[in-house]
Amino acid sequence: MPEGLEAELYRRAAERALGRTIEQVAVDDRQPWSREIESALAGAPFTAARRIGKRVYLDLGGRATADTLSLHFGMTGRLVVDDRAPIEALEYSSGRDDRAWDRLVVRFEDGGILRVNDPRRWARFELDPGTDRLGPDFLEVSTAHLTDAFGRRRAAVKTVLLDQSVVAGYGNMSVDEVLWQVGVSPLAPARELPVRVVERLVGTARPHLLEMLEHGGSHRGTIDPEIRADVSPCPRDGAPMRRDRVGGRTTIWCPAHQLTAPNV
């Protein structure tokens, strides 16, 4: 499922589309911006590929009538550029690449194609979106920001981390992985986490997430899809792991070393 790590892989893939003149655009007519996108992009090039959280932003130049096209991939959307996909198959989605599932198709004058393929139609595309409602990116968030955000929230720490207005980019799997690594229960009240624990979370998260990125994405952590499916014994201490619902999301964690009231 596309989380911030998957979006970064898509951003890198989108760089192959930069500087190429767009000849034709087709957008799923169920998209609210379908006709506007088709009109705005024709004849223009993409000039930059950026990412904030789970969204990829493709900046436009030339004769474009908009500045940026935003791509949000939902749970099952994949980016494919010139028939090369950075992620061949998403966890919890179809492994097929059925062209009938293409929701955005951008054809370039040189014959290449950028497309978003999504069997469930959850991907969303938008022109010139605002970003003021997004928190800092999950690979760049600071201890000071997270300490302040946690201090104002009574909710469980996992719920707060999944709030894209607090931190942009975390998804269900990456939050479970980071909290498992740091030894913090997903049920721990965010406002009760000591600053030293927040420092450890920030200091651990970025290098570990970047390592997962280089191995293929959010499903490449220790708490991988196999452990999530079977609720296997904890890889760290062998204790029974639990499956709970936190903030409406399935959560896998180890009560033996992930403490609800961490004090170290």
Image (cartoon, helix red, strand yellow):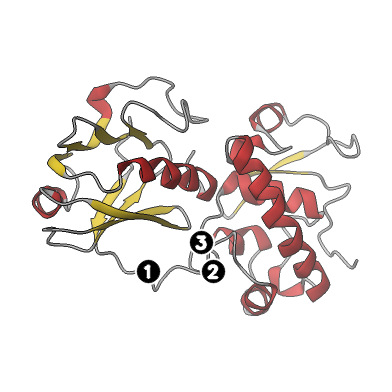
Q: Amino acid type of disc 1?
A: Thr
Residue shown at 48% from the left, 57% from the top: 53
Residue shown at 79% from the left, 75% from the top: 195
3D distance between C-alphas at marks 3 and 2: 7 Å
Q: Are marks 3 and 2 in contact (CB under 8 Å)?
A: no
3D distance between C-alphas at marks 1 and 3: 10 Å
Which sits earlier in the primary sequence, circle 1 or circle 2? Answer: 1
Could you say where residue 138 lies in the image, as x and y percent from the top left?
58, 60
Residue placed most toward the observer, 6 or 180: 6
Residue placed most toward the observer, 152 or 64: 64
3D distance between C-alphas at marks 1 and 2: 12 Å
Dot 2: within a 10 Å radius of its alpha carbon, few (fewer than 14), some, or many (20 or more) residues? many
Residue placed most toward the observer, 44 or 65: 44
Residue denoted by label 2: 166
Q: Nearer the viewer, mark 1 or mark 2?
A: 1
Q: Quadrant of the C terminus?
A: bottom right
Q: Secondary structure at mark 2?
A: loop
Is 11 above or below relative to 102?
A: below
Q: Are marks 1 and 2 in contact (CB under 8 Å)?
A: no
Residue shown at 38% from the left, 45% from the top: 15
Could you say where residue 263 lies in the image, as x and y percent from the top left?
89, 68
Q: Amino acid type of disc 3?
A: Ala
Residue denoted by label 3: 168
Residue shown at 71% from the left, 74% from the top: 191
Is residue 147 left or right of 135 when viewed as pictured?
A: right
Residue denoted by label 1: 131
Could you say where residue 115 lies in the image, as x and y percent from the top left?
28, 35
Is 182 above or below relative to 228?
A: below
Residue 139 visible from this viewpoint: yes
